[in-house]
């Protein structure tokens, strides 16, 4: 939480610096014709940013879909085991619960890499399920279809979480944005309105690159889905909601003030994920 706050403050300071740079930097001019250069560089910047945003957005939307699909598969899995072998309900509940807790501990963008142990335990539990009634034997195929789907989702997720925009691409985009900014600064005439508009354009260039970074790194998805959507799985399997300690914002605490929920308390986060789980009771 502190890191996010620091990043936000740093971003605001940088944008203010860009704006006041346009107002306070001494005027200067280039001896050559800059109109053609500005047109070419702006067009190239627009094409590249548009391409990368489109590609990153496609990954973002697909990742959003498969995460929802995984949650739905886990809920369906629990309901199916209740029908096939009621004696296995407690074990499958614990396996799903441990997997979801680990997923929230590591975060939306990393959990597919660090939860192999939990998912292997879950898949092994699925293999142990056998129908106890003859009329439910036909449902065993559905159970294995869910298992295959979970494996497929994790494989695809490992590909989708990788970033499209590499360091080389960022160098090109930042260089183009810098060239545009320098040329725009040379167009100032000493008029405060003109300088203010140029300052706002420079801030817009920065925000455009920041937007691309957030989409490419799936930060939008992490903030929207990371802690609230998975709670449906916990509720479906009859467990209390779970939140890592660092994820408990004031908004979440306020929403949960009338219900019981679990919190993961880390001993030395993020150096170690060792923790104890505490149940928080409703405030009176």
Image: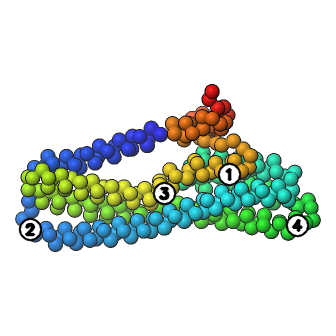
Q: How far apart are marks 1 and 3 (CA)?
A: 22 Å
Image-based side of 143 in relation to 261, left or right = right
Tell me where residue 125 appears, x and y as whole percent.
Answer: 79, 55
Q: How far apart are marks 2 and 4 (CA)?
A: 81 Å
Which residue: 71% across, 56% down?
Answer: 75
User: Which mark is first along the chain, 3 or 1?
Assistant: 3
Front-most of residues 16 and 175: 16
Tell me where residue 243 appears, x and y as whole percent.
Answer: 60, 41
Residue marked by disc 3: 218
User: Which mark is first along the chain, 4 or 1?
Assistant: 4
Image-based side of 53 in relation to 206, left or right = right
Q: Nearer the viewer, mark 3 or mark 4?
A: 4
Residue marked by disc 1: 233
For the C terminus, the quadrant is top right
Q: How far apart are marks 3 and 2 (CA)?
A: 42 Å
Residue marked by disc 4: 137
């Amino acid at each position: 939480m502190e890191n996010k706050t620091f990043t936000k403050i740093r971003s605001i300071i940088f944008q203010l610096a860009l704006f006041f740079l346009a107002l306070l930097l001494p005027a200067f001019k280039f001896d050559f014709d800059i109109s053609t250069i500005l047109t070419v560089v702006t067009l190239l910047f627009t094409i590249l940013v548009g391409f990368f945003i489109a590609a990153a957005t496609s990954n973002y939307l697909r990742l959003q879909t498969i995460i929802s699909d995984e949650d739905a598969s886990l809920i369906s899995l629990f309901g199916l085991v209740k029908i096939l072998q009621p004696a296995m309900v407690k074990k499958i509940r614990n396996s799903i619960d441990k997997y979801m807790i680990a997923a929230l501990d590591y975060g939306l963008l990393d959990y597919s890499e660090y939860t192999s142990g939990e998912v292997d335990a879950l898949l092994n539990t699925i293999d142990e399920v056998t129908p106890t009634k003859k009329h439910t034997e036909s449902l065993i195929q559905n159970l294995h279809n869910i298992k295959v789907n979970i494996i497929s989702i994790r494989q695809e997720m490992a590909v989708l979480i990788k970033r499209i925009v590499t360091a080389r691409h960022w160098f090109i985009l930042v260089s183009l944005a810098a060239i545009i900014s320098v040329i725009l600064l040379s167009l100032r005439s000493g008029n405060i309105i003109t300088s203010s508009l140029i300052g706002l354009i420079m801030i817009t260039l920065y925000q455009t690159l920041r937007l691309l970074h957030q989409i490419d790194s799936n930060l939008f998805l992490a903030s929207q889905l990371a802690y609230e959507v998975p709670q449906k799985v916990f509720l479906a399997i009859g467990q209390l909601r779970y939140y890592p300690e660092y994820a408990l914002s004031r908004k979440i605490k306020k929403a949960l003030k009338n219900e019981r929920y679990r919190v993961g308390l880390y001993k030395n986060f993020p150096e170690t994920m060792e923790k104890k789980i505490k149940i928080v009771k409703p405030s009176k």
